[in-house]
Image (spheres, rainbow, N blue to C red):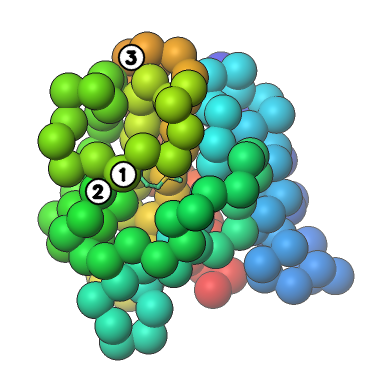
Amino acid sequence: MLTSLRPKVLSILNNESKNVDARLEEICELLRDSIDYYDWVGFYFRNGNKEELKLGPYAGEPTDHTTIPFGKGICGQVAVSNENFVVPDVSAQDNYIACSITVKAEIVVPLFVNGKNIGQIDIDSNTPDPFTEEDERFLEFVNAEVAKVL
Ligand code: SME
């Protein structure tokens, strides 16, 4: 159950002995290690006032896509839509940026600070169609808690 991870998320985020990026990386590792269908977990953040996202802390294989223009790919679309984007089958998307040929599905949930979309959490899965509303609610919780420490 994803809800059982909530206390762990809180204790990582409240650990003031680490800087925020280290805490976010630990969150990515917790999610990737604990949830078998989460194969790559990362945060993207808006790059200042530019219409682009920059890769932040992540867990999983390094990606070439460290900068993503607004509107491009699933991530870039969420930067402008302000809405969760659940992709059960990435091969059915034409505006999609492939990070690895093993990825079958993706979920991106925007991160709001004071009502402003300042970034997102992005999960890639090697399992087809794995994400449910439980993932959406859990990732909304994670982002709301992350927003408090940014
Ligand atoms: N697939 C994403 C790009 C980021 S990678 O998944 C890490 C997209 O289409 O925006």
SS class, disc 2: helix
Spatial distance from mark 3 to mark 2, Cα to Cα? 18 Å
Residue at point 14% right, 36% down?
Answer: 94
Q: Is mark 3 within 8 Å of ligand 1?
A: no
Q: Is residue 133 above or below residue 80?
A: above
**Residue receiving disc 3:** 129
Query: What's the residue type where badge 2 is placed?
Result: Gly
Mark 3 vs mark 1, foreground winner is: 1
Q: Residues within 10 Å of mark 3 (few under 14, many from 20)?
A: some
22 lies left or right of 128: right
Residue 40 x, y percent position in the rendering? 55, 36
Q: Quadrant of residue 114?
A: bottom left
131 lies left or right of 57: left
**Residue receiving disc 2:** 73
Q: Which badge, 2 or 1, comes first in the chain's sequence?
A: 2
Q: Which badge, 3 or 2, comes first in the chain's sequence?
A: 2
- For the N terminus, the image quarter is top right
Residue at point 67% right, 25% down?
Answer: 34
Q: Is residue 120 above or below residue 70?
A: above
SS class, disc 1: loop
Q: Quadrant of residue 71?
A: bottom left
- For the C terminus, the image quarter is bottom right
Of 109 and 98, nearer the camera is 98
Whether the residues at callouts 2 and 1 have beta carbons within 8 Å, the answer is yes
Of the four image quadrants, the one with ligand 1 is: top left
Query: What's the residue type where badge 1 is placed?
Result: Ile
Q: In this figure, what is the number of numbered marks? A: 3
For residue 97, say whether it is visible.
Answer: yes
Q: Which badge, 3 or 1, comes first in the chain's sequence?
A: 1
Residue 119 x, y percent position in the rendering? 38, 64
Q: Which of the labelled discs sits on residue 97, or is there none?
A: 1
